[in-house]
Amino acid sequence: MDSTILKQLEGYQSVVNDIEVLQRYGYNYRLDRGLVKQYVEQLHPHSLDVKVIDIIDETPSTKTVRLSSRKKYLPPFQAGQYISVTVSIDGIRTTRPYSISSSPDQIAFYDITVRRVEGGFVSHYLCDKLAIGDSLQISASSGNFYYNPIIHSNKLVFIAGGSGVTPFKSMIQHAINTGTEREMWLIYGSKNPDELIFNEYFASASKKYPFFKYIPVCEEGESRYKGYITASIIKDAVGDSSNKTFFMCGPQTMYEHMLKELQPLQLKPKQIKMEMYGVPTDIFSQTGWPKEISKDTTFTIKVRGKKDIRVQAGETLLQSLEKNGIIVPSLCRSGECSLCRVKLVSGNVYQPEGVKIRQADRRFGYIHSCASFPISDCEIIL
Ligand SMILES: Cc1cc2nc3c(=O)[nH]c(=O)nc-3n(C[C@H](O)[C@H](O)[C@H](O)COP(=O)(O)OP(=O)(O)OC[C@H]3O[C@@H](n4cnc5c(N)ncnc54)[C@H](O)[C@@H]3O)c2cc1C
Ligand code: FES
């Protein structure tokens, strides 16, 4: 910066005076240059090299992968946050977000708990191919799905579906380990009792700690509540909901169901916090999807400065780019973090309901490639 401009900055002279005083007492402030950057990088590194130190079977379809840092240091995180895991499978480099399921009161390791998804790509690799001793690259923790004592009530209702229970395991374990006697209810929907992840942990914690209630709801098999989570189950389990904050996490299909079920409870918007595990699984049945476009339809995407690629309808732009070896940075893969933004120069994409785009992005034609499905030939700029 030009030194004449520097001198006009507010506080400039007081900094010069402080430096003079420090130098008089023999302190060389120049040694500390870059210290702030070092701290920021330690607390929030761009990426981390981690080693798989254990793999734990949780249910027939779910495993916990325990990760420790290759540099003996993992940054702190908030219970409920996720990390993004980068993998290369069959020549395709891609990422997937996974909530940290271990508690932040210890950071010797992070646990992620992964359920094998039917027709899935990365979940199968993590559950079936990964071995103890393997290396992975992960991002620093991210996301804002965590308890904030300033905003949220200290009576918390956690509604989970399937693998969506993982952030709650971290939050509940953290509250228990740190002796925070916050009232918590976990209403956990699962296909059957065998697929309830961390079932033993939650069941024994609810017996030991009166401030924690565990309410499994199973579609099949033996359980007190059967079928899907409904407004009446919630009312029965938690009573008055007006003084509670609701956290909800699970696959996209669960939201559509739950948002309807929560209506009779008349919650205020600020009482509900949600984490969506990805974009809709069946995009062809979404409202507004053009009926004439089927799975067999293909389009050409012109990527300015790179090769043209052929893409299949129903795939996100990000998936198609990765399949063609074009890397776009990504974290949440659900239209939240904005990291995967690209500029749409021409053509049309379908964006599922609920995907947030900043006004400025909309104005200048930016889209989230992780939550945009091409519905015509397009041209984009990375
Ligand atoms: C913030 C965040 C945190 C997450 N945390 C976890 C976690 O702790 N544990 C975990 O197991 N997963 C978690 N996920 C989901 C995870 O990132 C992957 O989407 C999931 O593992 C599937 O990846 P895949 O590559 O196997 O499937 P893909 O190849 O991406 O998808 C294959 C098919 O499965 C569908 N699909 C993708 N995800 C799901 C799902 N969750 N349920 C049903 N169908 C799906 C896709 O739409 C597609 O049709 C999280 C997602 C987000 C956004
Ligand atoms: S990766 Fe976060 S918005 Fe696309």
Image (tube, rainbow, N blue to C red):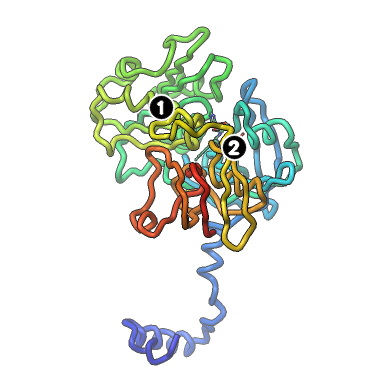
User: In what quadrant of the picture does the C terminus appear?
Assistant: bottom right
Q: Residue at x 39, y 31 (%)?
A: 287
In the displayed structure, would residue 54 be above or below residue 136?
above
Question: What residue would you read off at disc 2?
Answer: 112
User: In what quadrant of the picture does the N terminus appear?
Assistant: bottom left
**Dot 1 alpha-carbon crowd within 10 angstroms: few under 14, some 14 to 19, many 20 or more:** many
Q: Position of residue 49 (x, y in %)?
A: 67, 52
Question: What residue would you read off at disc 1?
Answer: 159
Regarding residue 177, the answer to whether it shows in the image is no
The residue carrying mark 1 has its beta carbon less than 8 Å from ligand 1 = no
Residue situated in front as seen by the camera: 97 or 90: 90
**Dot 2 alpha-carbon crowd within 10 angstroms: few under 14, some 14 to 19, many 20 or more:** many
Residue situated in front as seen by the camera: 189 or 299: 299
Kindly check if marks 2 and 1 are in contact, taking CB atoms under 8 A apart as contact. Answer: no
| Mark earlier in primary sequence (2, 1) | 2
Q: Secondary structure at mark 1?
A: strand
Amino acid type of the residue that numbered disc 1 sits on in the rendered structure? Ile
Q: Residue at x 56, y 47 (%)?
A: 318
